Amino acid sequence: MSTWQTEALKAKTTLQSSIPTQWLLPEDKLPPSDQKNVADFPRASGLLTDRELSITEMSATALVAGMGAGRFSAEEVVVAFLKRAVLGHQLLNFATEFMADKAIARAKELDAYYRRTGKLVGPLHGVPISVKEHIGIKGLTCNGGYVAWVNDIAPEDALILQCLHKAGAIFHVRTNQPQSLMHLCCSNNLTGTTTNPYNRTLTPGGSSGGEGASMGFKCAPLGAPEPGQEAILGVVGPLAAQSLDDLELFQRVVLDAEPWDVETSLVPLPWRRVKENREFTVGIMWDDGTVRPHPPIIRALKAARSKLQAAGIKVVDWDPYKHAHGWDIISKLYFPDTASSQKTLLSQTNEPILPLTEWAFSYAHPTPLSIAEAWALNVARDEYRDEYHARMKAMDVDFILCPAYVGVAPDLYEAQYWNYTAVWNVLDLPAVVFPSGMAVEEGDVGGKEGWVARNEVEEREWRKWWVDPGRFVGAPVGLQMVGGHFKDEETIAAAKVVEEVVRGSEGGRARL
Amino acid sequence: MSTWQTEALKAKTTLQSSIPTQWLLPEDKLPPSDQKNVADFPRASGLLTDRELSITEMSATALVAGMGAGRFSAEEVVVAFLKRAVLGHQLLNFATEFMADKAIARAKELDAYYRRTGKLVGPLHGVPISVKEHIGIKGLTCNGGYVAWVNDIAPEDALILQCLHKAGAIFHVRTNQPQSLMHLCCSNNLTGTTTNPYNRTLTPGGSSGGEGASMGFKCAPLGAPEPGQEAILGVVGPLAAQSLDDLELFQRVVLDAEPWDVETSLVPLPWRRVKENREFTVGIMWDDGTVRPHPPIIRALKAARSKLQAAGIKVVDWDPYKHAHGWDIISKLYFPDTASSQKTLLSQTNEPILPLTEWAFSYAHPTPLSIAEAWALNVARDEYRDEYHARMKAMDVDFILCPAYVGVAPDLYEAQYWNYTAVWNVLDLPAVVFPSGMAVEEGDVGGKEGWVARNEVEEREWRKWWVDPGRFVGAPVGLQMVGGHFKDEETIAAAKVVEEVVRGSEGGRARL
């Protein structure tokens, strides 16, 4: 066994020894490994009681209300989610470490507090939150997907966790991430590959793929990813399993804790309380000008347009404004030093460089950017932001409804096109992705006749669809709502309205 | 005449041809060129009427109130300040261009509006503002102190000027700046050297030295400097001739205009209205640990301490926390590319590099910083900010009262030590400099006996004092109030209280 394998084994051992074995199902009780969709397995598994099933299908907002009314205890809530998470891990390999004992002990403390005072400790009292591995937890390793960092111990809890903890949250499971954190997929040399609960041949995405799987399988009502850098700031943002209300709750809790009073790089912008309304204009972006989205995405957008219009919401078309230019800026800024710091980390243990890591590194300029070049990119970025903002104002468009990706979840190791999300990062615009309530249907599969790609990238991305579109049938279709600069609060509020309208006439079924 | 001289002549011609000659005093009516202090010359000059003298000695806040009550017109206000500015320019060489006709035309428009509606157009109605040359004004050149840029024409007014204009401000004169903008002095190869109205052998400082002279001579009640960059953000901040109230007014007007709705790199932080109070703790910093301030500064700080204590304001000592480390960070970030972009600009015309430009460039690392090195400095900067912030909180210190410079205004071309101000820039803390009401006295001059420098920098900076301290007698002593991170509003409010207390028992004389 080579050095990197010895080192990587430590991460596997940490994971294995942390799993609460009392809740593991024997192999023969699990669905066959070729069963793609396992999202409904918790009900069939027999592991969770009906009460636990219903607890794990509630939003954080509803859970807190329930605990506040004494309808259930923090302990039973965290146990329910732990059981579901263990099951999810057996099926999806989404965890890097369980923290069951600590989570249960914390839940007991919260319950004691509630019994003693009749009060909740805060707005996230007893809410289990899964946490992406690269967010530091005091005393635990923090490897960020690199074998070289497998022995790094976080000296303290990350500030965002401190804020959530104070509000009453419980951290019960840490989740997987790709090597280098720069894949739209979730695979590394430490704990392997995480898969999508709706179709285990597809990816839950990346870099927060462990969180994606955790939310999709309802291993927690809320999840916490988060990153770094200066020119293109990583986005601190939550994932929610059940409801956009929970995204609002998460953001509110974190910002109400005034984290800028500790980390002075944060701007003291309080979270504003905004009211939902329908007095806004949605611009629908059908295509980003480089890669047209696959047929089910277009179908979902068309359905959304009809429903929004029927609901009296103003809808116009939105032309993508210089999105390729935006990609040009952001892709150069990802690795301004030719990814040499990342490559150095990988070479320290000689761990194999995964194909999607190579792919991401290939965006790096072949020579290190000079400071002057980086500054010029910053200027280009700021000009692009100003222009985009002015354009939205001039067209009177408040929100943009658009694809979240070129298609539904891609095959494992195949996610290569990022610009349906990256462009909002370079533009620094808030974006919310939500399930449309629709999924790929047999009817989406035809229509290859006469189709012509506009460029090589489009050719490549559509080849992945044409090769066998039938394999995506049943995969859920997400849509993305993008709001104005610093209009995070309005964007969540409007996304809630749009999601309700778009999914409303689908028959009132439970939220994904 | 070499190329750079031909080019530089254009700037001189622009300046000369813009001067409203009807207000020029003949040479023989001016004070002798060896008269140092010319601050009181406007009264002696005979150029301004008593009414004009009193107008030019009012704050912007008072002027707007006066115009709102119909006590004087915008036209007479701008004419009064134009006359004073022409005189100031003859004595101090502070202007780069007058805009008299346009300013008077604008004042007439404002007066017509007021006559028609009985209202002011905005909170800066009729207030003349002098503007540092490097802030673009549509159709005018914008050279930033470089001969190479003498033909550059600004395509539009800078956003900050648009905000001020909308609020009713009038721009009547553009002001001088040093070559490369990086001196604590004000000298270039275009329009020469600006001097200090209190002592023309001293500098008004830099890089906003033209503005400093403009304020000191009361050529405008308010002045607008402003810069660029990402790692160390230039500070947008006003200068005021008469009153700290005007600083608040300026900031309020600019931020109430919501400039972030045009320039998306600005954070939407509204200007908060805060009430003055005396419930705060002032930490007095006597020394930054590298260069002790000269005797008159220490005397002013001691007087301030006594008066603050007598006024019931809590005062403690503040130890400088790693200020040399802060300087190390900021000085490396000034010119991360070895100042090559600046040097290229200078070499384009072969204009001579001035000694203080050389001095500033000498801070640059001998080889270009790599992106990784720049990022490491950003991290060090953020850590330093967090530590400093935590320390102020732990010590319960709300504001720091400290020197604004190692001494009073330095001799021309001699300003070399920046860290009594630069450190607040790297720390991103708001700072207000105000006159202490005190000036250098004969009694400050002695005490060399037994004095020992702690290091070479201190040796160098004190040599400038010992060589002939008598030459500074009469020079005003400024002090600096520094507030917490993003506490700009509280800092101005507290500075007003402190200034009032510190100057209060000096006999109630007019400000400055």
Image: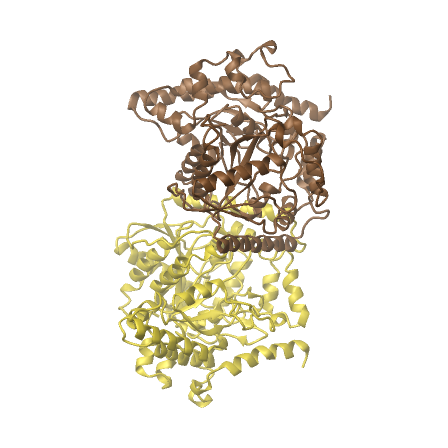
Chain colours: A yellow, B brown
Residue at horizontal 50%, vertical 74%?
A: A194
Query: Measured from the top left, where is residue B344 in percent x and y?
Result: 69, 37
Image label count = 0
Q: Is residue A123 above or below residue B356?
A: below
Q: Is residue A296 above or below residue A278?
A: below
- Quadrant location of the N terminus of chain B? top right
Query: Measured from the top left, where is residue B18 in percent x and y?
Result: 55, 18
| Residue A275 shown left or right of residue B347 in the figure | left
Residue A37 shows in the view: no
Residue B124 shows in the view: yes
Q: Tell which of A344 and A13 is nearer to you.
A: A13
| Residue A302 shown left or right of residue A451 in the figure | left
Query: Measured from the top left, where is residue B260 in percent x and y?
Result: 44, 43
Residue at horizontal 47%, vertical 83%?
A: A33
Residue at horizontal 49%, vertical 34%?
A: B238
Query: Measured from the top left, where is residue B426 in percent x and y?
Result: 57, 47
Q: Tell which of A49 and B477 is nearer to you.
A: B477
Q: Quadrant of residue B140?
A: top right
Q: Is residue A346 above or below residue A269?
A: below
